[in-house]
Image (cartoon, grey):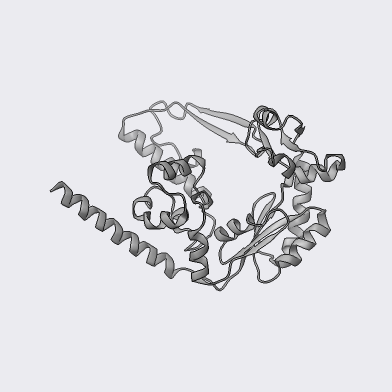
């Protein structure tokens, strides 16, 4: 009986999964070309532009506590963004540290955005050094104009949606570009060969879980086992770029999380006195803010906007 129920549940999951994939396929739009522009080692490149003596030397922007980014010379030694500086020094003893200078980065970011605006007035930005543009056949010209305006190089990925464009922009870095044709067969062949780490929402920890637990290393295997995995990841991750790529409504997501927290605490008869908000900036500075005395009896009745 147990085996029958397990088999039935498995078939039901596959049925719902196949239906979900069909729904995503129906929303696929191959009529547009999305360009993802990613400045090459942006912070480090700006610092080198400000101090040419750094050119050709392994250099990182940040502190001994945390590195914001590293130039390509340093990356050859394994130095990466998000790495503690003292570990980076062990990998590269000659590593030069430069403190962050966000006024400079913002200035050069504004220069690049003026160039982007010439090609797509409705472009969207991910952060200071990344942007998405809905354009066709202008990537090389855009990259040349960015270099003329700033003296900095960038790489581009050209694909039918933003998720795939971001993956493509990393293929021929630095100072290169990659074009993924607007053809379903070409797209499926391309994503099948990708490492699962390339899927949006899958980081280092999840990658190890997929490899060690499910023996999934590439997207091709991920797709075959997706009936089991679709409940573990966000819709944007599970879709692999098959559907739309509109940015999520961050505010509504925060309200949803606040409602879930309040409901869970009420269900478990738990009460809170302090809500701590933790903010980590792009320069890896962490600040904590405590909201005390939310309510003597707990979160019940607290306005959602307060959370």
Residue placed at 66% from the left, 28% from the top? 65
Left or right placement of residue 46 versus residue 178 in this view? right
Residue placed at 71% from the left, 46% from the top? 41
In terms of image quadrants, where is residue 155?
bottom right
In terms of image quadrants, where is residue 63?
top right
Q: Looking at the picture, how far across and down is residue 132, in whole percent?
A: 64, 59
Instruction: Give the number of callouts.
Output: 0
Left or right placement of residue 30 versus residue 56 in this view? left
Image vertical order of residue 88 relative to residue 129, above or below: above
Residue placed at 35% from the left, 37% from the top? 264
Q: Looking at the picture, how far across and down is residue 225, in whole percent?
A: 36, 54
Q: Looking at the picture, how far across and down is residue 126, in whole percent?
A: 63, 52
In terms of image quadrants, where is residue 22?
bottom left
Image vertical order of residue 78 relative to residue 10, above or below: above
Image vertical order of residue 153 relative to residue 21, above or below: above
Name the residue furthest left: 1
Image vertical order of residue 278 relative to residue 196, above or below: above
Residue placed at 72% from the left, 39% from the top? 74
Q: Looking at the picture, how far across and down is residue 117, in whole percent?
A: 72, 63
Q: Nearer the viewer, residue 300 or 126?
A: 126
């Amino acid at each position: 009986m147990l085996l029958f129920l397990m088999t039935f549940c498995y078939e039901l999951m596959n049925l719902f999964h196949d239906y979900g994939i069909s729904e995503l396929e129906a929303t696929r739009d191959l009529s547009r070309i999305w360009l993802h522009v990613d400045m090459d080692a942006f912070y480090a490149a700006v610092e080198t532009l400000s101090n040419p003596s750094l050119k050709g030397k392994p250099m990182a922007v940040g502190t001994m506590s945390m590195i914001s980014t590293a130039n390509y010379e340093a990356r050859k030694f394994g130095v990466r963004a998000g790495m503690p500086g003292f570990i980076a020094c062990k990998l590269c003893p000659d590593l030069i540290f430069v403190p962050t200078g966000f006024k400079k980065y913002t200035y050069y970011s504004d220069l690049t955005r003026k160039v982007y605006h010439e090609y797509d007035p409705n472009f969207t930005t991910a952060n200071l050094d990344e942007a998405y543009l809905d354009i066709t056949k202008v990537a090389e010209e855009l990259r040349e104009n960015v270099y003329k305006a700033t003296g900095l190089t960038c790489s581009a990925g050209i694909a039918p949606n933003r998720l795939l464009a971001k993956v493509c922009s990393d293929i021929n870095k630095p100072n290169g570009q990659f074009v993924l044709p607007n053809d379903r067969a070409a797209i499926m062949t391309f994503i099948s060969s990708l490492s699962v780490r390339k899927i949006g929402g899958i980081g280092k920890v999840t990658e190890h879980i997929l490899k060690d637990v499910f023996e999934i290393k590439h997207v091709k295997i991920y797709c075959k086992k997706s009936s089991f995995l679709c409940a573990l990841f966000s819709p944007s991750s599970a879709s692999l770029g098959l559907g739309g790529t509109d940015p999520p409504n961050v505010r509504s997501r925060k309200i949803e999380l606040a409602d879930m927290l309040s409901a869970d605490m009420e269900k478990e008869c738990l009460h809170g006195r302090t809500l701590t908000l933790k903010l980590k900036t792009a320069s890896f500075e962490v600040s904590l803010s405590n909201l005390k005395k939310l309510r003597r009896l707990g979160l019940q009745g607290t306005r959602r906007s307060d959370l």
